[in-house]
């Protein structure tokens, strides 16, 4: 079987200590990508030396460095632009792939080339507590293609979860979805995955094939702690899908706005504990 060409993109900023783990795990995959593009965002630690050392040992590593810090989303879009493969995998410099991720994903992708992306079960691990769990469990019991209609069924049952750290994007599909929209910040990949997935369907491998390490100071966690900024991101995501959105900060305001009927979605700033150790904003659909 001829497997699709894959580009791996790694945005990096000051992860010199963790980069070797990330890169070694990728270079030990049973199927190698066409290229590994490392985009250093003007790191101030020893990242450049680490990257140059790996690049000297592996011809598939391509190194690009920003003259000034541009942020994670800029790096993702730059990597998408530079990628030569038909498929793109974005690897976080502080995460790790497990044996078989690329081979199992690409073999399934070759069977369903129209799918927007492929994903697997992910291991999430909180660095501070050591607690770990699996995400994306229950969507299927064998490798398969999930059509948009099937994705809707899974979502209605609360069983749809695309783990971004396991996702291999079809490059043309994510570009058609607008790439990674900077104003969506830490949710830009989530938005791209679900927009493209609900258009073209996804491939799913029911094996845990990557580890996402959860840090309290990560880009995603820090953003979610800023409630005003988080509401703005949620509002913008919904607006991009054509919804009229409003926000309520308490029950009385929510009731008043719900009765007005002037919007499709009402976001309530109710904080609920989440299993990932962060807070999740409960979204209440007032009318559909």
Image (spheres, rainbow, N blue to C red):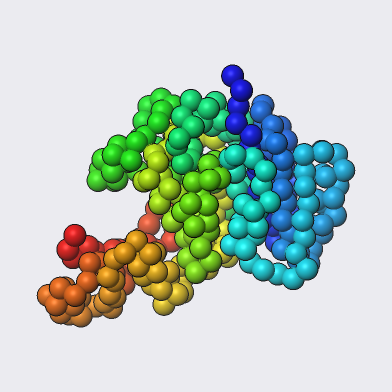
Q: Quadrant of residue 227?
A: bottom left
Q: Residue at x 60, y 48 (%)?
A: 90
Say which of 249 and 119 sits in front: 119
Q: Residue at x 44, y 26 (%)?
A: 143
Q: Quadrant of the N terminus?
A: top right
Q: Quadrant of residue 46?
A: bottom right
Q: Is residue 198 visible?
A: yes
Say which of 277 and 102 sits in front: 102
| Residue located farthest toward the top when viewing the structure as drawn | 1
Q: Is residue 25 visible?
A: no
Say which of 102 and 123 sits in front: 102
Examine the rendered structure and indicate whether residue 260 appears above or below residue 145: below
Say which of 44 and 133 sits in front: 44
Residue 144 horizontal/vertical position (percent): 41, 28
Residue 58 horizontal/vertical position (percent): 82, 38
Count of picture labels: 0
Residue 126 horizontal/vertical position (percent): 53, 52
Q: Quadrant of the C terminus?
A: bottom left
Q: Residue at x 14, y 77 (%)?
A: 260
Q: Residue at x 35, y 43 (%)?
A: 160
| Residue located farthest toward the left when viewing the structure as drawn | 259
Examine the rendered structure and indicate whether residue 262 appears above or below residue 211: below
Residue 50 horizontal/vertical position (percent): 82, 51
Along the horizontal axis of the image, is 56 left or right of 98? right
Examine the rendered structure and indicate whether residue 99 appears above or below residue 47: above
Along the horizontal axis of the image, is 210 left or right of 277? right
């Amino acid at each position: 079987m001829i497997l699709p060409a894959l580009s791996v993109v790694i945005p990096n900023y000051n992860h010199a200590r963790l980069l070797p783990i990330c890169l070694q795990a990728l270079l030990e995959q049973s199927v190698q990508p066409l290229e590994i593009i490392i985009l250093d965002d003007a790191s101030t630690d020893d990242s450049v030396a680490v990257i140059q050392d790996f690049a000297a040992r592996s011809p598939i590593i391509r190194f690009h460095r920003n003259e000034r810090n541009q942020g994670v989303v800029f790096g993702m879009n730059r990597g998408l632009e530079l990628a030569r493969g038909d498929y793109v995998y974005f690897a976080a410099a502080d995460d790790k792939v497990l044996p078989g991720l690329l081979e199992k994903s690409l073999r399934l992708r070759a069977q369903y080339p129209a799918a927007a992306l492929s994903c697997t079960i992910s291991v999430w691990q909180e660095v501070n507590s050591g607690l770990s769990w699996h995400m994306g469990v229950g969507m299927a019991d064998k490798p398969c293609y999930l059509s948009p209609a099937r994705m809707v069924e899974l979502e209605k049952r609360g069983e749809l979860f695309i783990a971004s750290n396991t996702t291999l994007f079809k490059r043309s599909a994510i570009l058609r979805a607008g790439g990674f929209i900077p104003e969506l910040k830490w949710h830009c990949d989530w938005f791209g995955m679900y927009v493209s997935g609900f258009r073209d369907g996804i491939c799913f491998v029911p094996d845990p094939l990557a580890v996402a390490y959860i840090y309290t100071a990560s880009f995603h966690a820090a953003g979610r702690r800023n409630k005003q900024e988080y509401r703005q991101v949620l509002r913008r995501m919904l607006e991009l899908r054509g919804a009229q959105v409003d926000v309520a900060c308490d029950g009385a305001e929510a009731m008043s706005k719900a009765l007005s009927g002037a919007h499709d979605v009402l976001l309530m700033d109710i904080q609920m504990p989440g299993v990932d150790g962060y807070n999740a904003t409960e979204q209440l659909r007032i009318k559909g």
